[in-house]
Each structure stands twice: as C-alpha cells, then as structure tokens.
Amino acid sequence: MNARFLPLLATLAIFLVAYAICYAQYPAMLSTRVIGNLLTDNAFLGIVAVGMTFVILSGGIDLSVGSVIAFAGVFIAVMLRDTGLHPLVVFALLLTLTTLFGAAMGATIHFLEMPPFIVTLAGMFLARGMAYVLSIDSVPITHEFYDTLQKIYWLMPGKGRLTLIGGLMLLVFVAGALLAHRTRFGMNVYAVGGGTHTAALMGVPLGRTTVGIYALSGFLAGLAGIVFSIYTSAGYSLATVGVELDAIAAVVIGGTLLTGGSGFVAGTLIGVMIMGLIQTYIIFDGTLSSWWTKILIGMLLFAFIVLQKGLVWTTAKRRIAGG
Amino acid sequence: MSGLGVFFRRIWPQLLTLAVIVGLISVMFPGFFDISIANGRLYGSPIDILNRGAPVALLAIGMTLVIATRGIDLSVGAVMAICGAVSAWGITAGYGLGATLLMALSAGLACGLWNGLLVAVLGIQPIVATLILMVAGRGIAQLITEGAILTFNHEGLIFFGSGSILSVPTPVVIWVLTGALVTLVVRRSALGMLIEAIGVNLRASTLAGVNTRVLLIAVYMASGLCASLAGVIAAADIRGADANNAGLWLELDAILAVVIGGTSLLGGRFSLIASLVGALVIQAVNTGILLSGFPPEFNLIIKAVIILIILVLQSPAMRTLLVFFSRDPRGVAETEKETVTP
C-alpha cells in the first residue's frame, strides 16, 4: 500500500474510534441532529481550512485568515448598515477585496523572496487593524435577506438539519478536492510543495502558482467571513482570534505534511470534524472544562507530527535499503 | 576599525529609528522628557517606555538566540501565561517567594526543554514544533488557574511588577540585567559564534564537531527562561494571572523586535542589543500612538506598515537591486555582509 495514504487512514481511524467512544457513552451522539450541528458550527472553520490546505501543500503558511474573517464580518455589517446595497453586492465586493489581499501577499512572498510566515503576519496585523478602524464595537446585521439565508435548510432523515452554511462547506470541500487532484493548478501546488527548484525546472510557473494559492486562501477566508456573519448575525473586530491556528491544526490532524507536497483536501474535512467532535463531547459531558479542548488538540497535533516524522523516516530508510 | 566602531555601525539604523520616533513624539508633546521622582521611583514617559517594553524586551532576548539558529519560537506567549499562572498559584497556595519563583522559572525551562527536544532530537521544523505548545499552552495555563483569574496580594511578588530598585522600576532592571548577562555569555565565549554557525548551516556545524543537539536544546531553554521572567513580570504587574490574555500576541511582537533589530529570519548573524532597541522601538510606537490621541486601533496598521517596509529593505530581491545600482563592488560586498535595515 502507498505510504502516502497512511496519515489519511490514521486520521479516519482516529475519527471513527473517537466517534465510537462518544457513541458508547452518549448514544444520542449518532443522531443526524448532532451531525447537522457539527457541520453548521464548524462551517467557517472548514471553509478556511480548505484554503489553508492549499497553502500548506505548497509548503507555505497563512497566518492572516483569522483576521480576514473578522474584517469580512465587520465590512459586511458596516456596509449593510451605512449603504443601501444588497447583501449579494456586498458579498461580491468583499470577495474581490479579500482575493486581491491574498494575491498581494502571494506576490510579496514570491517577488521579494520573503518567508510566508512573516509576510502573512503583516497581513494579519493589517486585516485586524482595518477591522478595528471600521468599527470597534460589535455591529449587528438586521437584513431580511439574512433571515431568509438563515432559514434555509434541508431536513435530513432523523430530523437533523443540514443548514445552508453547512452545505456550503461540504460544497467547498468537494470543489477543493477537485481543484487539488484534478486540475493543472492543483498539480502545480503539489510540485511547488515538493521543492521550488525542482518545480521551476519542471516548468511550473512559480509566480503564478504562489499568487494563485494565496489569492485562493484569501477568497476562502472571505467566504468563511460571510458564513461566519450568517452564523452570528453580527460583525465584530475581535471575533475569530486564533482561527488560523485551528485551521492549521485541522490541516495537520487531517494528515497533510507541514513541509508541503503531500496530503489530501478530504483529510482536512476529517480533521475539522475531529476538532468539532472534541468540543461536542466536552459539551455533552458537562463536567469537563473548555480548556481540555486546547490541550487535547495540542496532543493530537503532537501525535500526528510524530507519526509523519516516523513515516518520512521509514520511507527514506527503505529507499536507502532498496538502493 | 575598532570594536566599538563596528558595534555602532551594526546598530545605528535601529538607534536612528528609535531616535526619529522619540523625536517625533517629543516634538508633538513638549513635556515628553519630563521625568520626576515620586515615592522613591522614577516617573515619566521615557521611563514608561522602558518599563512597559520589559516583557517584549525579555522575549526578544530569547527569540534572537532562537532565530539565530534559523528557528522560531511561537510558544513564548503561551509559556508566559503558564509561568504567570504557576507563580500566582504558588504564592496563593502558601509557598514562599523563593519557591514560587523557582517553580515559575522551572516551568519555563521545562517548556523550553520540550520545544528543544522536538526540534533537536525529533528534527521537527521549529514553527511546527513550537506551534504545539502555542495551542496547548493556554489550555495548560487555564488548567492551573482553573479557568479563573488568580489574584494575589503578596508584596514580594508584586515587587517584580511595580516595585523599584534605586528608584528604577524593577522590570527595567530585570531586562537590562538579563540582556547584559546573556550578551556577556554569548559574546565573551564561543557560544555566540557556534549559535550563528548552526543558523548558517546545521549539517556543516555538526560535521565540524559542534554539539548542535545540546546547543539547540539550550537555546530553546533560554527562550523558555526569558518567557518565564516576562510571565512573572506580567502577572506581578496586574497582581493576578490571566491565562487567556497574558502574553497574547507577544510572540509576534518579539519576532517583530528581532526583525527590526536586523537579525535575519534565515538565521546566522545576530545582535542582542539591536533586538532590544527593536523592542523599545515597538513600545515607543505604542506609547506614541497612545499619547497622540490617535485611536489605538491604528496601532496594528502602523505595525503592519513597519513590517512591510523592513521586509522590502531586507529582501534578497532588494539586495540584488542594490548590487545592480552600486558602482563600487567593494561597497556592495560590505553591505552584503551586513543585514540591510532601514
């Protein structure tokens, strides 16, 4: 069997075992209601994690996404409050803005040859600062279009609700998987993650790919911001602090190699679901405190990083042994 | 050139930046330099910059060493929260001041040891290795404080936040002493050079006989120790341990201080004093924005602009441009050797 699939299988196994443990204690966990809530509550995280998967597959990192989500929420809320524009127009404006923002960061990374870490750190400060400048207070969104959006859902068997934003997240995952595994852009992302020099020698357009990756991450962060504003009906500049860490953790738990070049978009979905499951379990339990979420996610991160390291090490050894 | 001359050539861009910012503030606020003594302690805006800048300055000392080895330590903010929580817990549980401080510093060292083992023994990239503690650390701190803000009234511990030694605020004394001590240790021995060697080429230094494994672990432990000092100061300052907000985003400020100090994120040559001046630059900007009555929300945008300017000036592409436009190849060689800073 291909060693590439091992981290993905490990993720899947952990998810199933964790769900089985939860089910053994609380049989209600297997209802479609819980699954529907799991999808709805983690919709924004899932969408932003798809963008993060592409960034990490290329060997980069994007620290700005949490701030971009907060900026998106405030931008939508302020635009709807102060102008008579229809939400759809505001959405289009916002997505253009965040895509350009991501593209600008990608261009800085490529043309100035700077580490993605520090460039996106500047982007994080900038986006959060712009959100503060627009409004420090939480701005409520009261638009009838939002009410209709929030009421759309598909009743699953067992009375679980698949909401619009939960469905949108699944759609983004499908689109992301197709983009990663079935298009030239996806192949280029994997190639860049495998090594920029090799990729350049293979004829991969480095500049276009890097700009495209960060533009995609910016676009999806904007989309996650829209989803988050539908989820909370408000825009708040202090919201979603640290979501970039959650997204990175979800990608790593999903089995994507942090050095780039190896991983699957589908794994990230399972990673997001594992993190959501831990939170749901803690809520079901009621006696465990919320900080156990952070500690458990940290432990999972550690386990997966060590697993990846072991895999890389054994494959390298086998290659040497095989001559 | 004499040693002192070389030293000033290295840090003049940072000193100039600090001077320009302080100059701008003092032009707008003529009373900026008024320093008074009340209750046996110095007061005034310049003292305030030195005092408020203490946590970032302390973190920057450890971060400089880590970045010089081509690493990065994202966990320092979380380690601050852990050590603040440990010190508050220790003092409220009735342990003495000495035992409490010892526990807090040991907690910092243990966190550093964990990071160092992951990086040096398991060979995990530093960003990823320290990310684990960054995510889990605040959870651990909350575990210690049991989710509440642990407050305390112990005079001895509060002294580290708001006391003064010879009318100088204690935090200032601590970071200046730590900075001087670490500089002395790394520059008066071969340690500094060995750390730089690791940053330039880890494999080559190992082959040359440097014990890179032990040295890397030691560097991360030094960073953990600096973070624990900063954590104790932050907790003593507010007389309580706030696991959620203590040291929040300070890892980014510390990295920024090191970058302003002209130490390359790609490892190699470093200057502790330039990083400390960098930390003061950040604090001067913060204080300046507060004094000027600008809404504090501009703070982040200004920081972002500063990072962008430095990035452009430090970037390899910019250096190529400099080589292109320079007529004197020797001059280029000189600038090439030094890290280009604003």
Image (cartoon, helix red, strand yellow):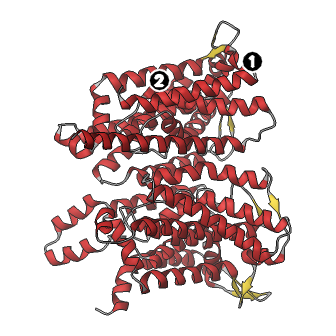
Identify the secondary structure beneath mark 2. helix
Q: Using the image, name the chain to which the residue with label 1 belongs.
A: A
Q: Quadrant of the N terminus of chain B?
A: bottom left
Could you tell me if residue B104 is visible in this image?
yes
Report helix, strand or loop for mark 1: helix
Q: Label 1: how many residues lie within 10 Å, few (<14), some (14-19) or many (20+)?
A: few
Question: Where, quadrant-wise, is the C terminus of chain B in this rendering?
Answer: bottom left
Q: Quadrant of residue B230?
A: bottom right
State the image coordinates of residue A284 (x, y, percent, origin top left). 76, 28
Horizontal and vertical percent position of residue A151: 67, 15
Circle nearer the N terminus (1, 2): 1
Residue under numbered circle 2? A173
Which corner quadrant of the image does residue A14 belong to? Answer: top right
Q: CA distance from mark 1 to mark 2?
A: 27 Å
Q: Which residue is mark 1?
A: A28
Residue A215: image tag: none
Tag 2: amino acid = Phe
Percent across and percent down for residue B84 are: 71, 64
B305 left or right of A237 in image: left
B52 vs A314: above or below: below
Specify the farthest residue to the top.
Answer: A157
